[in-house]
Image (cartoon, rainbow, N blue to C red):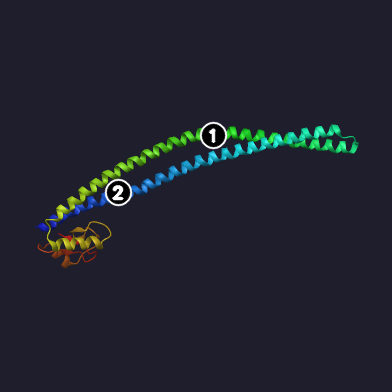
Amino acid sequence: MLDPQIEKLLIVQDRDLQLLKIERDIARIPIERGSIEAKIAEEEANILAAREYLQAKEVERSELDLEVKSKESALQRFRTQQLEIKKNDEYKAMTQQIEQTEEEISNLEGHEIEVMLEIDSAKEAFDEAKQVIEVRIEEQKKQIATLNERELNLKTSLIEAQARVAEAREGVEGIYLESYDKSKKQVKRPPYLAKIRTQKCDGCHLRVSNDVAKEATQVGEPHLCDQCSRMVYA
């Protein structure tokens, strides 16, 4: 004959396990949400990095353009000055200065063209990647919204589960509850109340002593496994 108090405790344990599952599900949500938020932050950082690269290239092109214009102004000044030179050696020196400036302008313009091509290529790649990334971010935000909704539902379920546990505990005698609660604190994982089968505890799967196996069949007081300290019954 199964102890009526054990029957009631089995209901308590079943509801405790349901409560434990809900608590674990709730505990996992912030971790999952944090992982998704980290992915979103990484995606946004990639967009920002690409945008900053484009901006840097635009600044570089603008600076090259200003430098070309500065060199062109200097070139025009040199040519004007050359017309006023009378001495041959000074004329040759100015000619060299003009040629050098023309070469510098040519090099700057070549570099500017390269930068402009890089900008065009980077813009095209940025626009394509940005669209893909934004779609992913939107999907990830939907996942977070789903997690938030699930968290709210679980918290509601948690309150209900706690109430069901409290209700089940009401009909259990104090000495049994005390023993059951002590078992919950001592063991690392459920069950907290285990059946003895063929003289083995269903909780730790170790063989119990003959005394424990015999006592577990008796009604009227709680009994413990001498291997793992779980409450046991037969």
Q: Which residue is mark 2?
A: 26
Q: Position of residue 83 (x, y in %)?
A: 85, 31
Q: CA distance from mark 2 to mark 1?
A: 41 Å
Task: Mark 2 and mark 1 in contact? Answer it, CB < 8 Å.
Answer: no
- In the image, 40 versus 89, the foreground residue is 89
What secondary structure is found at the residue carrying circle 1? helix
What secondary structure is found at the residue carrying circle 2? helix
Q: Position of residue 114 (x, y in %)?
A: 65, 35
Q: Is residue 224 above or below residue 8?
A: below
Q: Is residue 185 above or below residue 80?
A: below
Q: Position of residue 52 (x, y in %)?
A: 55, 40
Task: Please tell me which of labels 2 and 1 falls first in the chain.
Answer: 2
Residue 225: quarter of image: bottom left
Mark 1: few/some/many CA within 10 Å (<14, 14-19, 20+):
few
- In the image, 225 versus 97, the foreground residue is 97
Q: Left or right? Give the position of 29 relative to 161.
A: right
Q: Is residue 158 above or below residue 137?
A: below
Q: Which mark is residue 125?
A: 1
**Identity, as a three-letter code, of the amino acid under mark 1:** Ala
**Identity, as a three-letter code, of the amino acid under mark 2:** Ile
- In the image, 71 versus 138, the foreground residue is 71
Mark 2: few/some/many CA within 10 Å (<14, 14-19, 20+):
some
Q: Is residue 162 above or below residue 187?
A: above
Point 47% across, 33% down: residue: 131
Point 50% across, 35% down: residue: 129
Point 36% across, 38% down: residue: 142
Whether residue 120 is visible = yes
Q: Left or right? Give the position of 70 relative to 211.
A: right
Quarter of the picture containing the C terminus is: bottom left
Q: Left or right? Give the position of 49 relative to 59.
A: left
